[in-house]
Image (cartoon, rainbow, N blue to C red):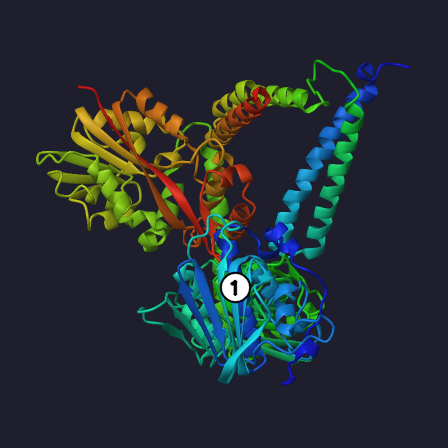
Amino acid sequence: MSKSYSSRDIVVLSGLEAIRKNPWMYVGSVSEPGAHQLLWELIYNSVDEALAGTCTRISVTLGPGSCRVEDDGRGIPTEMHPTEGVSACEVVLTRLHSGSKFSRDAYRFSAGLHGLGLSCVNALSERLEVEVRRGTLYRQEYVRGTPQGPLKTAGRTAGRGTTVTFQPDRTIFRTFKNFDEELCARFLEELSFLNPGVEFILSRGRGARPRSFRNRSGIAGLLARLNRDARPLFASPLSVRLEKKALSLDAVLQWTTDREPVIRSYVNCVNTMHGGTHVRAFLAGLTQAVNRAMADSGRLAGPGEAAAPDEVSEGLTAVIDLKLAHPNFEGQTKTRLTNADSSEAIEKAARDRVLAALKKDPHIAVVIADKILEVRKARIAARRIAEKIYFRRVDKKIDEEVYKEQFGARSKNWHDSAAWITDDKLLKAHAALFKPDRKALALDVCCGSGVVGASFRGRVRKTMGLDLTPQMVELARQRIDEVRQGNVYDIPFQDGMFDLVCTREVLHLLPWPEKPMSEIFRVLKPGGQFIVGQILPYGEADGPWMYRIFKKKQPLIFNMFQEEDFRRMLTDAGFTDLQMKELRVWESIDVWIDSYETTSLHRHEIRELYRNAPAEAKAVHPFKILPSGEIRDLWRWCVFSVKKPR
Amino acid sequence: MKKLEKSRTYRNLRKAFAEEAELAFRYLYCATLADFEGQEKPAALFRELAEGGNCSAHGCLDFLRGARDPDSDLSLGRTAGNLEALARAETRQHNQTYPEMAKAAREEGLPDIASWFDTLEKAKRRHARRLKELSDE
């Protein structure tokens, strides 16, 4: 790697106005994520110095609406540029497609946008100050990309490095307020695993204690972090390494008892959250290795039974750290790699190294094979659920077995299967709708683990529960006074027994909800209250989109109610005094879809639905796709209270 | 020469339009499935053909644009008229098509599909409203 990083390394291609005109083309969006993208670009520039082996410390300081990134790298060249008549530093900051990454002498691998990084940040900043330390201290200030004077010397300085302080331009990033500290922390921590030994520091201005991220464990440490709450199928992860002239691959992988694959891929330290050619090639090689090992040990009956990549990747946790001299990405924010030239080498390396490891340790081959056969069994079961529904539908009878099978399996980790189940705020919203009555008898129908019924504790004399699934009945007994097994279509209690009936997120799973509604009405005393919580679309606009997501997650969904439907259903059943409380609860979609009844194809389709959400749905329904690829959705919960007339 | 509206070719153009549009969406759907299987080449081909289908479907509309067919209400001309005609089409789906489909699905014991038609019905109601708001401006 060349140490003489000088003005000669900077190549000029064009000017800045284009960026301010079409900022989203360069940073993906003009909202919060776009402003953060500016910060990522600066950090990537420093990371490029670390990749070149010339930087050991990168620190990020967040201020109100601004940010400073400092590194101890070589410092941007400050000499006059041979053809531009200004300092090389100014060229890098003001000319589009300028920078050393066009001539390959200064960097072997680089993460930053190709010559867009610094100029892009500068163009989209209200103010930017650059400070370069190369024995001499240099400073220059910019306003919206325009220099407020030439690069000036400001005395001598020890050490080397670059410091950039900037404020994203609010006339462009209108909704931007501050940098998200947690997001930055996760970003830097991830980088600390990819650049072992380099220290990443995050601080929030004066007074606050800085957080330091430094890891010597590398991507193996990141893998262990990702598997923190999972149960691995074997002790030490497998690793795949490949070193070629324009390519360096380092990957670690392990299978766990989970289902949803967790695959983190990086190209020159950039998180390719939407994968791309490298991930596909890696999985293809892995699949070949696993199939070969399964065939050799006689676990597969015939050639038609070969495991598909999606079966092999169930429960897989992998970190793929690829360095490429000439990466090609889809879009400037680099979420997907498109290079096909390196696919073959990656596929072969993954196949050969993993196969060798499986041959060396046959025990690992056996547990992976078991996992794949289990996945296959679950998939057949999931399909059977869908088929069973349709066989029984015509006579309007519900096949209890379908529900028992699914919720029996899910009872094992019920409380971990979604955040809403135990969300305190949500439970309290249900309870708050009931005026405490020391004599009241309550019933929680389709009670699951009984959390809703239990939230009325102290407000009622006694709570009873009803659920179809024996395992759920057992769980509910830990929380509710008395629990019976039974069907909501035929509630096993006398007329007019209860002062309160509650249920939550159940009626959409029932093909003919009017019947259970009339059963609930029947068992209530005159004047008794029914409290029911339900996730509803925000309106007409996100209905079709939400319907598809929910139906793919849960084949037992029969109704995507909208608020007007739900109100009508309650009043049609004879209830009066309708009140509704609305709450918004963030849900992790990754956790929610990692579920027994959701096939890997459906999980893939759900992710695609979030990525390609129609504009009319996005306009009303908030959700986030984090830089790591995780999806969080702000669900609209409506908690209704109605009364049976006296 | 026969008037286009009365010709067999007119009906064929409408059929060709419907089939090309249908095929384009099928291609896009299949491309997502191919992505899942990691089948890169078929996925790319499907997307390319969908784009071509888009052009073919619009090519049919190029001819249909000249026709006047009150039965089909397929008005293609100035935007003011298009807004009204499209609002009528969405209203028809909302008032008639989807309620009928939902009813049939319930009668046939397919409540989840009925709920899908209900959902579309509401989306159509909103579309019609938005088109109408704009055309009233």
Residue A88 in percent (x, y) is at 65, 73
Q: How crowded is mark 1: few (under 14 residues within 10 Å), some or many (20 or more)?
A: many
Circle 1 chain: A
- Outermost residue toward the left? A438
Depth order, front residue of A477/A198: A198
Depth order, front residue of A469/B121: B121
Q: Residue at x 43, y 47 (%)?
A: A633
Report whether A563 appears left or right of A304.
left
Quadrant of the rendered image containing residue A493: top left
User: Label 1, on which residue?
Assistant: A128
Residue A366 in percent (x, y) is at 49, 71
Q: Quadrant of the N terminus of chain B?
A: top right
Depth order, front residue of B5/A414: B5
Report whether A641 appears left or right of A43.
left
Q: Is residue A639 visible?
A: yes
Which amino acid type corresponds to the residue marked 1 in the rendered image? Leu
Q: Residue at x 67, y 77 (%)?
A: A7
Find numbered disc 1 in the image and state the secondary structure of the residue it sits on.
strand
Residue A246 in percent (x, y) is at 68, 76
Quadrant of the rendered image containing residue A346: bottom right
Depth order, front residue of A40/A126: A126
Q: Is residue A255 visible?
A: no
Report whether A175 appears left or right of A569.
right
